[in-house]
Amino acid sequence: MFRKILIANRGEIAIRILRACRELGIQTVAVYSLADQNALHVQHADEIVEIGEAAPRESYLNIHRVLQAASATGAEAVHPGYGFLSENASFAEAVTAAGLAFIGPPASAIRAMGDKAESKIAMKAAGVPTVPGMEGLTETDDFTRAAGEIGYPVLVKAAAGGGGKGMRVVRSAQEMPEALESARREAIHAFGDDRLLIEKYIEHAHHVEIQVFGDQHGHLVHLFERECSVQRRHQKIIEESPSPLLTPALRQQMGEAAVKAAAAVGYYNAGTVEFILDPASGQFYFLEMNTRLQVEHPVTELVTGLDLAHWQIRVAAGERFPYQQAGLSQRGHALECRVYAEDPAGGFLPSTGLLLRFDMPQGPGIRVDSGFAAGQEVSHFYDPLLAKIITYGETREQARLRMLAALRQCVVHGVTTNIDFMQAVLAHEDFVNGKVHTRWVETSFAWQPAPATLEALVTAALATDANKPATATAASHESEPFSPWKSSNGFRN
C-alpha cells in the first residue's frame, strides 16, 4: 500500500479522497492555488504545497508544478479526482514516467475514450450499440447532407468534448451553419480542438450511465446504473440509483455492454460508460466514457455498499478487486442533489461571494460531501459546486422524501443557490413518476422563485436597522427624533 498520496484537485472531491486516505492510514499532500489558501482541503491535508495563481492553467492544470509538488514531498502516487487533469492522458503518462502511480486507468484508455469520434468508432468495432451518426466531417455541406440521411433533429458535438460544451441540437438545414459555427467556437475555447461529429438526436431521451470497475489483473465488472436525466445545459443536477426506468433484463444488457466497452480499451480502476436510452423503444446507445471517478459516485456506493475511493487506491497499488459480478447487487435507493452557487431564475449563471452562513443537513440516511464552510469565498475561477447531498432509503419514495426534508434544512447565505429549484423538481409529478428526460428542465418545467413574504421583508428591514452603526443611528434620530422605527427599545405596533 502507498505511504503518501498527492491529491491533484480541490473542493469536495479533494476532501473525499483525503478522507479515504486517512481511513486507509495513508499520508496526504494537498496542492492549492493562491485563491485556495484557506480552502478546506488545505486545512485537512497532512502536507500542503502552493502551485500557482488562481487561474486553473497557472495551478491545477499545470502538470509541471503538480509533479514538482509530488517530488518535493515524496508522494508515491497521484489521485486526480475529477475535472482538471483527471482525463488528461499526457498527465497520466507524465505521472508514471516520474516513477509514481496514477490512481486511475491507463493513459491509453484515457486517450482512446477521450476523443468522442475515435471512441465511437472503437465501440462500433466492439459491438456496443451507438447512436446513428457520422464522424470525420468538416464542411457545412457534408454535415447538412449527413443530417438529411440521418433525419432531423440531429446533434452536432465536439469530438474532443464533454460536459455539454460544443454541443448543439439542429432541427433543420437552415439552422446548420450557425450551429456548426457556434459549436466549433465553443469547442476550440474549451478543448483546443474544433472537430465536430454528428449523430441522431433522440427526443425525450434518458441519460443512464453504468459504473464499471476493474483491477490490473484483468478482472472487470459493472456496479449497476445511475439515472442522470435531470440536467441543465447538458449538465447533471440530480442523480439516482437504481433508475426507475430499467427492467432487470435491460439492466443486465446495459451492464454487459458497459463491460464490453471498457474491456475494448483495456480499462481498469473506476470508470463510467454513459448511454442514451430511448424510453419509447427501449433501445440504448453508447454516448461516451468518463475515465475517472464521477461526481455522482456516492449513490453507487450507498446501493452497493462499496467504497469506490478506497478501491481506486487499492487496485492502483496492485490489489485484486475481489467481487464477482454474480455476487454484486443493489439494495435500497439513493438520490444525489448537487448544490450549486448559481441562479436558476437567471439562466443558471454562477453566483460568487462570501459564504456568510453554510449549514448542511444531518440525520439518518443523509450524507453530505462538501468542500466549503462558512466564511469561505466562492470564486469565479472554479466550478460553483458547493456540496452534494445524498440520501438513502429502502424505497425510491423514502429517499425522495428524505431528500426534500434534507434540502429544507439547508441554510446558505451570501450566494444564490439552486436549493429551492431542486425542491420543486423533486416535488413535481413527472419526477415522482420517473418521466423526466434530459431536456425536461428546458422544455417542461416552468419555475420561478417564490416571492419574499411580507414577514421576511419586515424582518430584513428590522435586522438592517438594528445592525446599523451607532453613528448612523444617532444621525437618523437627529433628523427624525420621534420615529418609533429608529428606536431600539423593543417598540411594537
Image (spheres, rainbow, N blue to C red):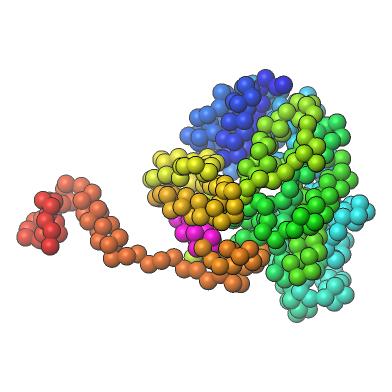
- The magenta stretch spans which residues? 415-426
Q: Which of the image's four quarters has the N terminus?
A: top right
Q: Position of residue 128 (x, y in %)?
A: 87, 55
Q: Is 303 or 133 nearer to us in this picture?
A: 303
Q: Is 362 or 330 nearer to us in this picture?
A: 330
**In this view of the protein, can residue 377 be seen by the observer?**
no
Residue 319: quadrant of the picture:
top right
Q: Residue furthest front?
A: 394
Q: Position of residue 344 (x, y in %)?
A: 51, 62
Residue at 46% from the left image edge and 68% from the top image edge: 448
Residue at 72% from the left image edge and 71% from the top image edge: 203
Please, is residue 407 above or below residue 71 in the view?
below
Q: Is 398 or 368 nearer to us in this picture?
A: 398
Q: Main secondary structure of the magenta part?
A: helix
**In this view of the protein, can residue 263 be seen by the observer?**
yes
Residue at 43% from the left image edge and 53% from the top image edge: 408
Q: Within the magenta stretch, is there residue 471?
A: no
Q: Residue furthest left?
A: 482
Task: Tell me: 75 left or right of 173.
Answer: left
Residue at 49% from the left image edge and 65% from the top image edge: 345
Q: Is 225 or 342 nearer to us in this picture?
A: 225
Q: Which of the image's four quarters has the C terminus?
A: bottom left
Q: Position of residue 28 (x, y in %)?
A: 61, 25
Please, is residue 228 above or below residue 272 in the view?
below
Task: Tell me: 240 left or right of 416.
Answer: right
Please, is residue 293 above or below residue 142 in the view?
above
Task: Tell me: 54 left or right of 260.
Answer: left
Residue 397: quadrant of the picture:
bottom right
Q: Position of residue 125 (x, y in %)?
A: 93, 54
